[in-house]
Image (cartoon, helix red, strand yellow):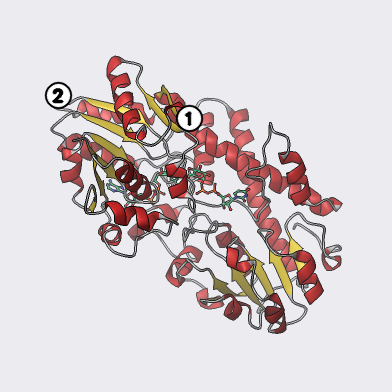
Amino acid sequence: MVKICCIGAGYVGGPTMAVIALKCPEIQVAVVDISVPRISAWNSDTLPIYEPGLDEVVKKCRGKNLLFSSDVEKYVSEADIVFVSVNTPTKTQGLGAGKAADLTYWESAARMIADVSKSNKIVVEKSTVPVKTAEAIEKILTHNSKGINFQILSNPEFLAEGTAIQDLFEPDRVLIGGRETPEGQKAIKALRDVYAHWVPVDRIICTNLWSAELSKLAANAFLAQRISSVNAMSALCEATGADVSQVSHAVGKDTRIGPKFLNASVGFGGSCFQKDILNLVYICECNGLPEVANYWKQVIKVNDYQKTRFVNRIVSSMFNTVSGKKIAILGFAFKKDTGDTRETPAIDVCKGLLGDKAMLSIYDPQVSEEQIQRDLSMNKFDWDHPVHLQRTSPSSMKQVSVVWDAYAATKDAHGICILTEWDEFKTLDYQKIYDNMQKPAFVFDGRNIVDVAKLREIGFIVYSIGKPLDEWLKDMPAVA
Ligand code: NAD
Ligand code: UGA
């Protein structure tokens, strides 16, 4: 019986292994992690991450061919295939700080594999890593191998949070990169056989190691670039009276461009887009390609500009100050259907408003008060490190309250910011909300989900990204 072990029980390791266990009943899958609370949560009724459909998959396999354990060494030593799905954050200190990937967690996992292995293994890079990481990992493993054969494969993950299970069930493609040697090809086949249990073989792409590693960074960069492109257009739409939704629709109808991923927003968030582009930029710089590096850097600059622009719109619309004013923040997660707040644009928007001394009342259906307080008092990039390494500042968080209902958040507020596109925000009773707010009452829709005409009819002053401006906003400066 084939035995798989995955190091890292996070957003990728947990769901991916649960789906492999479901689709391959004859394979034993162990998911291990150094975080004991995380493993306990995977073994409980309240899984550590919120992901539609995940509970059902885990319930079907856990205790049969799927287990979660903090006994990392035992399950790694027994496995034939070891996936490594640990975090690969942006470095915060030293060479490449603020750009390069921090491979501390990866390297310690690789050294541990070398230490505990007693039989040949296929080691699979599941984490997103810089190009040529496999070479470094290979060196660590072979220099400590005690005669054991390790084959390294790159098998980057393309799932998106909120749709992870669906993405894993029906992936657009599975990418496997390996050495172009007979042993490398044999390892590729072994992993391809796992996925072939449910993925059509024409969707399983096999490449060399470096192409697989780079394709993952490239795919995220291309996706983020689309969002920055449409967000750049949204600023021009506001300046000209065009409507960004109409522009996106018209542009996306070109089959060469396609309609997906063209929604203007307050900015992209999530644990990976920024991190992976910074990593790409660093690799370009290290390879003497400053023009290429600058090209990709611009995707992040536009994203930062979009968040700043949004905050400036709010402040300038509300008589150039939000000091002491109650602002309701609807949505804190980086997108709907997840409780994940890593790099959420809500952090930058809230910090911008707090900088102008606003009083924030925050509501998100999936994010806890503790998480929000931690996010707002943490330094940039620290979120992707273990909790004991996260330096939080003693905060001015008296300005922040977290409530469990959109109506409580908006009561007596001067303005509302919609920062996550949760479905429930589309169907709120906005008349009731308006009646309970200070006047003039403002709505700043960072996700373009409200019916602007209807809200204006109620009496709100509405700003919606990239849409023709409210009369009120027309003479206000758009950016600082
Ligand atoms: P995560 O932080 O949710 O999970 C990583 C886990 O690894 C943590 O639970 C941590 O405790 C554990 N870990 C770290 N070092 C360890 C070690 N030495 N031994 C055992 N466990 C260890 O991260 P994630 O979101 O699952 O991302 C993992 C990787 O996958 C990253 O490289 C990321 O870029 C990539 N990725 C993420 C997504 C996503 O949607 N989150 C999608 C595709 C790819
Ligand atoms: C993204 C990619 O979509 C995955 O393929 C990839 O595996 C993953 O990153 C990763 O490597 O971590 P994810 O970040 O989970 O997945 O979610 P997305 O749906 O890509 O959304 C990212 C951000 O872009 C969100 O803040 C979302 O609101 C925003 N977005 C997305 C827009 O602003 N407009 C759009 O049209 C689409």
Amino acid on which the number 2 mark rests in the picture? Gly
User: Does 193 appear above or below 423?
Assistant: above
Amino acid on which the number 1 mark rests in the picture? Leu
Residue at the (78%, 49%) spot, across then down: 246
User: Does 163 appear above or below 373?
Assistant: above
Task: From the image, tell me which residue sits under label 2.
Answer: 147
Instruction: Judge left or right: residue 113 versus residue 457.
Output: left
Q: Quadrant of the N terminus?
A: top left
Task: From the image, tell me which residue sits under label 1.
Answer: 214
Badge 2: how crowded within 10 Å, few (<14), some, or many (20+)?
few
Q: Position of residue 133 (x, y in %)?
A: 38, 31
Q: Secondary structure at mark 2?
A: loop
Q: Position of residue 135 (x, y in %)?
A: 34, 26
Instruction: Judge left or right: residue 108 versus residue 472.
Output: left
Badge 1: how crowded within 10 Å, few (<14), some, or many (20+)?
some
Examine the rendering and report whether any part of residue 461 can be seen: no
